[in-house]
Image (cartoon, rainbow, N blue to C red):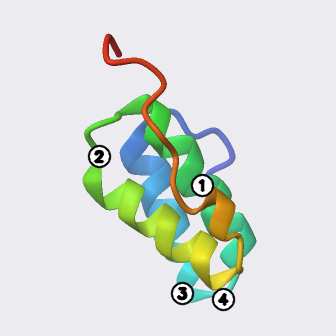
Amino acid sequence: MKLSLETADEFFDQGSHLINQGLFAQAAQAFFSAVPLRWTFTEAHIELGITRSALKQYDQAYVPKISSSL
């Protein structure tokens, strides 16, 4: 597995791979890392919410946009 991830797509792919392995906490972190790199990455937002919900982290299942200027 690649250790140095730089793009939202790479973090998303890593998160998807981790979900397939049943590693939900690590997958959530990967999706969480993808979101600020590309706020419009709808799939990353959705997978982050689903993964956090599966972990019963309901208060963290939604990541609000920090500023409308981003």
Please tell me which of labels 4 and 1 falls first in the chain: 4
CB under 8 Å between discs 4 and 3: yes
Q: Nearer the viewer, residue 20 or 38?
A: 38
Q: Quadrant location of residue 13? A: bottom left
In whole angstroms, how far apart are the C-alphas of marks 4 and 1?
A: 14 Å
Among all residues in the image, which is located at the extreme front? 59
Residue on which disc 2 sits: 41
- The kind of residue tagged 2 is Phe
Please tell me which of labels 2 and 3 falls first in the chain: 3
CB under 8 Å between discs 2 and 3: no
The residue tagged with tag 4: helix, strand or loop?
A: loop
Q: Residues within 10 Å of mark 2 (few under 14, many from 20)?
A: some
In whole angstroms, how far apart are the C-alphas of marks 4 and 3?
A: 5 Å
Point 62% across, 84% down: residue: 54
Per the rendering, the mark at residue 70 is none
Per the rendering, the mark at residue 30 is 1
Observer-side mark, 4 or 2, equals 2
In whole angstroms, how far apart are the C-alphas of marks 2 and 3?
A: 20 Å
- The kind of residue tagged 3 is Asn
Residue on which disc 4 sits: 22
User: Residue 55 at x, y = what percent?
Assistant: 70, 79
The residue tagged with tag 1: helix, strand or loop?
A: helix
Point 67% across, 61% down: residue: 59
In whole angstroms, how far apart are the C-alphas of marks 2 and 1?
A: 13 Å
